[in-house]
Image (tube, rainbow, N blue to C red):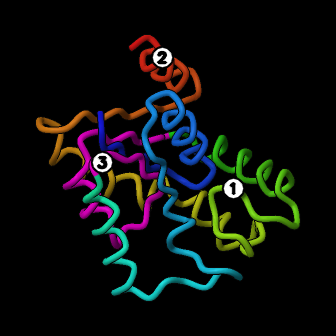
Amino acid sequence: MKKIMIIGSGGAGKSTLARKLGGLMNIEVIHLDKLFWKSNWVETEHDEWIEVIKKQVKKKSWIIDGNYASTMDIRLIEADTIIFLDFSRYTCLLRAIKRRFMYKNKSRPDITEGCVETFDLEFFQWIWNFPKSDRNMILKKLDKYKNEKNIFILKNQKELMKFLGSIEKK
């Protein structure tokens, strides 16, 4: 496991897992939110975004967390390991709400400075609809790589802790 891609709904714990794995495995962690968002939630222009991702995935090793459908295929091709945090919408919503209060009036460590943590209707709807809108697309994409890449689909915190335990033993 040298190129690890972590995907899942908002609030699933992608960035937290990335930091933990990065520490355990001594691999650079790349947070897509930090690369995509400029200060005050300004999006990176599409062509620039594609080039940024192409550059990142060519590195010798990495742990990249985040979904971003526009670059998912680029990352899937280069990754040797994909971790899909397939947690319930309720777990993700509770974590996102908790995160909102934890980082009230400040930026998270995994996002660009100047992007103050928010929880609005659009974000709520994305998390709530993720199991229907994004999950099946992700599972189809992962199915294409099931024979050539390490794929872990973790459904809850217990499975995540078991997975982390297996990494710590190596």
Q: Quadrant of the C terminus?
A: top left
Image vertical order of residue 142 relative to residue 118, above or below: above
Q: Position of residue 163 (x, y in %)?
A: 45, 22
- Mark 3 is surrounded, within 10 Å at the Cα level, by few (under 14), some (14 to 19) or many (20 or more) other residues, namely few
Residue that label 1 marks: 109
Q: Quadrant of the N terminus?
A: top left
Give how far apart the Cα atoms at labels 1 and 2 are: 24 Å
Image vertical order of residue 111 relative to residue 146, above or below: below
Per the rendering, the mark at residue 139 is 3
The earlier-in-sequence mark between 2 and 3 is 3
Residue at 69 percent across and 50 percent down: it is 93
The earlier-in-sequence mark between 1 and 2 is 1
Q: Nearer the viewer, residue 92 or 101?
A: 101
Residue type at mark 3 is: Leu
Give how far apart the Cα atoms at labels 2 and 3 are: 27 Å
Q: Which residues are magenta?
A: 60-86
Residue at 34 percent across and 73 percent down: it is 70
Residue at 78 percent across and 70 percent down: it is 116
Residue type at mark 2 is: Glu
Q: Tell us which disc is closer to us: 1 or 3.
A: 1
Residue type at mark 1 is: Pro
Q: Position of residue 103 (x, y in %)?
A: 82, 57
Residue that label 2 marks: 168
Secondary structure of the residue carrying numbered label 1: loop
Tell me, yes or no, whether the highlighted magenta stretch contains residue 51: no
- Mark 1 is surrounded, within 10 Å at the Cα level, by few (under 14), some (14 to 19) or many (20 or more) other residues, namely few
Image vertical order of residue 58 relative to residue 87, above or below: below
